[in-house]
Amino acid sequence: MRRLILTLVMLCVASVTFAGAGSSLSSYYVIPAAAHLPGQGHTYWVTDLSIVNPYSWRSITVGIFYLPGDRDNSAGWPTVGVTLAPGAHVTYRDVVATVFGTSGKGALGLITQDGAYFTATARTYTGASGTFGQTENGQAVLAGPIQRQFLTGMENDGSFHSNVGADNLSSVTLHLQIDAFNDQGAHLGSRTLAIPPMSMSQISVSSFSSSFSSGYLVVTCVDSTPGVLWTSYATPVDNKSGDSTFVEGRVDWEYTWARPQYDMSGWWYGWLTTSSGSQNGYLYIAQDGAAVTLYALWPDGLIEAIYSGYMDGNVIYPTAYLGSSHFQCNASTFLGGQLTVSGSTISGQATMAGVSGCVNGTFSIDVQATSGSPFAMSMKAASVPTGRQAAAVRTGKTLRRLLPSLAKKLNAD
C-alpha cells in the first residue's frame, strides 16, 4: 500500500486546486450551452468550439463529448477525440452539426486522458452576411450538493428578456431552485428545475418571475446527493437587436448563507475510529467563514481522510470526500454525516463506501483542541481557500471517471 508523507499530499492537493480554479488552464472544461437550432425573429443559432494546446514540446489528446439537452444521457453520449500538435489550435465550426451530426441544444464537455492542460472557448451566434452572438469560456470549477451560484446583471422587461440554464454532470437527476431578485433584493419569483442525468436545460426567466429592469438570479442545488456536479448560466437578450450576453454562474464556495458559531481553525487531538479500529490521532481544520476543510491524520503524520464542507450554527456538515494519503482510497464515496462542535470539542461521524483498505464504513471523530502542531510544517501555511479546493478536487475526480469510456472511444477513432 503506497502512502505519502504529509508534505507531499498537501503539495498534490494544492496543485490540483490551482489547476482547476478560476481562469487558469485546466485538464477539463464544460461549455454550458451549444446549439444548432432556430431562434426568434428568423435567426438560426450555431456554436463554434476552439481548443488550444499550450505546450511547445508535446502533443495532447482531448476528448470532446456532447450532452443533448432535456434528456437522460447516462447510458452514453457522442464522443470524439482530437490530437493537437505542440502549440496547435483547432476550431470546429458549427460543432453540434459538423462534429456530432445532430441539431438542437446541449452541453459540451472536454477532458484529456492523461491530465494534460489546455484551454477552450466557444461562440454561439447567428447571422448571414454579418453575425452577432456570445462567447463562452470553458468552465473548470463546478458546484456540488447544497451549493448555490449567483448570476448577476439580469434584466427582464420590455427592453430585455433573460434565459437561465444549467448543466448536470452527474449520473442522477439534478434539482435546482432558481430565485429572481431585483436590485433592492426583493424576491420576484421562484422555480424548481429538474435536469436529467448528464444533460442540460434552459428556461425563460419570465416563466417564473415578474418583470424587473435590474437584478440577479440565485440557483441553489436542493440535492444532498454526494458526487453531484453542476453549473448554471444566463443569457440576457436585447429585444430590439437580438444581441445577447453570456453570464457564468459564480459558485458560493464560502457558503455565505450559513452562519458559523465558531472558528474551528487549528489542531485537534483525540480518538479517530475507522472500520479497522480506533486510535489517537489529529484533526486539522482550515476554515474560511463557513467553509471548512478537515484533515484527519494518524500520529505519524499520514492523512487518513480529507473532507470539505461547511459549518452552520454549531454543526459541521461534510459534503465531499477529497482523498487520502493512500492513493487507492480516492475511490471511496462520501455518503453523509455531521460533526457537533463547541469551542473546545468536536465529535461526530462521516459515512463512506469504499473498496477494501480504503476509508470505508463509519469514520468517527471525538477530539479536543490542542495548543500546537506535532509536525514540522504548518497545515494552514500549506492550505489554499477551502471552498475552491473542494470544488477543484471534486470536479477533477468526478469527471475523470469518464476516462475509461473516453479512452476506449478515442482509441477506436
Image: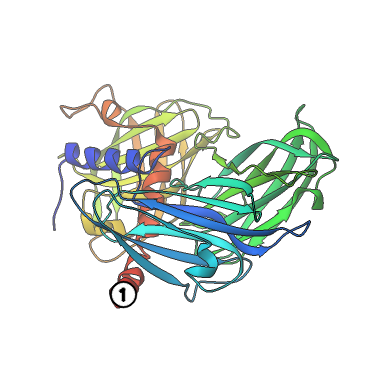
Question: 199 or 45, which lies in front?
Answer: 45
Question: 253 or 33, which lies in front?
Answer: 33
Question: 119 or 50, which lies in front?
Answer: 50
Q: Residues within 10 Å of mark 1 (few under 14, many from 20)?
A: few
Which residue is at 13% across, 55% downward?
A: 2
* Residue 301 is at least partly visible in this image: no
Q: Amino acid at mark 1?
A: Lys
Residue ID for mark 1: 408
Tell me residue 253's x, y (percent): 49, 37
Q: Tell me the quarter of the image containing the N terminus.
A: bottom left
Tell me residue 263's x, y (percent): 45, 25
Which residue is at 85% across, 43% downward?
A: 210
Display coloring: rainbow
Q: Is residue 43 above or below residue 365?
A: below
Q: Is residue 392 above or below residue 73?
A: above
* Residue 280 is at least partly visible in this image: yes
Q: On the image, which quarter does residue 217 sit in?
A: top right
Q: On the image, which quarter does residue 162 sit in?
A: top right
Q: Residue furthest top?
A: 371
Tell me residue 330's x, y (percent): 29, 56
Which residue is at 26% across, 30% downward?
A: 382
Tell me residue 270's x, y (percent): 29, 37
Q: Is residue 254 above or below residue 131?
A: above
- Horizontal side, residue 218 vs residue 29: left or right: right
